[in-house]
Amino acid sequence: AQKITQTQPGMFVQEKEAVTLDCTYDTSDQSYGLFWYKQPSSGEMIFLIYQGSYDEQNATEGRYSLNFQKARKSANLVISASQLGDSAMYFCAMRGSSGSGGGADGLTFGKGTHLIIQP
Amino acid sequence: DTEVTQTPKHLVMGMTNKKSLKCEQHMGHRAMYWYKQKAKKPPELMFVYSYEKLSINESVPSRFSPECPNSSLLNLHLHALQPEDSALYLCASSRRDFTTDTQYFGPGTRLTVL
């Protein structure tokens, strides 16, 4: 079984500051994927960034980067130069390879971090 | 283009009604998913379809019946639901069902069961 832990239920950050959202995971799978999604109040889940378990370099996508520390089983999201539009719920999610149907599992999500950017 | 569409956006139904949720993607993805999200909770996986075949059913009650008529469409048929089934229902798709494949989500259907 996979487990994702996000220990920050809520965060307040000043606009233009960098912010780090914590995520730790637990799995016995050798091959897995780690994902971050943003969910505004409208409800849509927006994909931000992906890190594969075999990737040696940390993933980056524009203002988003993923600080992947495999030995510590952590996959923290870093948002540089935060903007008011970054206010949303952020979910860390994982996908393992032990799917009962023979393929990969669906996504297992953490409980999320509610990020509020203040002007 | 990473668009997944879902209809309807909102649905209110009684416990004796039969309704269906629809999800569509035209990205050539061969894996599609249904998730249920209760308020202030993370999404929970319900079903996975891979190449139009049901590959994962996460012990979902039979009042939820998925259907994948073709590689672009995914339906969720609802019958005799309970008020506790009120939630946001999210559809997603990915290129295949590998761990490396990103799932792209639709905007969701907000379901209220009276």
Image (tube, rainbow, N blue to C red):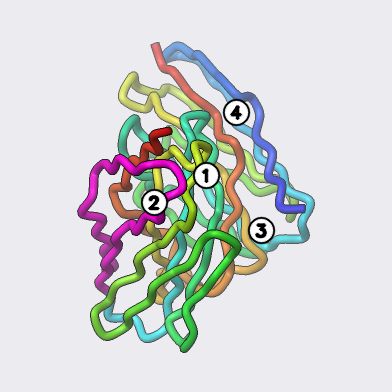
Callout 2 crowding tier (Cα within 10 Å): few <14, some 14–19, many ≥20: many
Left or right of B19 in this view: A25: left
- As helix, strand or loop, the secondary structure at mark 4 comes to strand
- Of marks 3 and 1, the one in the foreground: 1
Report the number of numbered marks: 4
Asked whether the beta carbons under mark 1 and mark 2 sit within 8 Å of each other, the answer is yes
- In the image, residue B13 lies at what x, y percent? 49, 14
- As helix, strand or loop, the secondary structure at mark 1 comes to loop
**Amino acid type at image mark 2:** Phe
Q: Is residue B55 above or below residue B2?
A: below
Q: Residue at left 54%, top 52%?
A: B33
According to the picture, the residue beneath numbered tag 2 turns out to be A91
Asked whether the beta carbons under mark 4 and mark 2 sit within 8 Å of each other, the answer is no
- In the image, residue B4 lies at what x, y percent? 68, 45
Quarter location, residue B37: top left
Q: Tell me the subunit letter for badge 2.
A: A
Quarter location, residue B97: bottom right
Query: Is residue B65 in sight in this rendering?
Result: no
According to the picture, the residue beneath numbered tag 3 turns out to be B52
According to the picture, the residue beneath numbered tag 4 turns out to be B20
Left or right of B58 in this view: A59: right
Instruction: Find the magenta span and give its range.
Output: A1-26
Query: Is residue A30 in sight in this rendering?
Result: yes
Is A112 magenta? The answer is no
Asked whether the beta carbons under mark 3 and mark 1 sit within 8 Å of each other, the answer is no
Query: What's the distance in space between the residues labelled 2 and 3, CA to CA?
Result: 28 Å
Query: What's the distance in space between the residues labelled 1 and 4, CA to CA?
Result: 21 Å
**Amino acid type at image mark 3:** Glu
- Of marks 4 and 2, the one in the foreground: 2
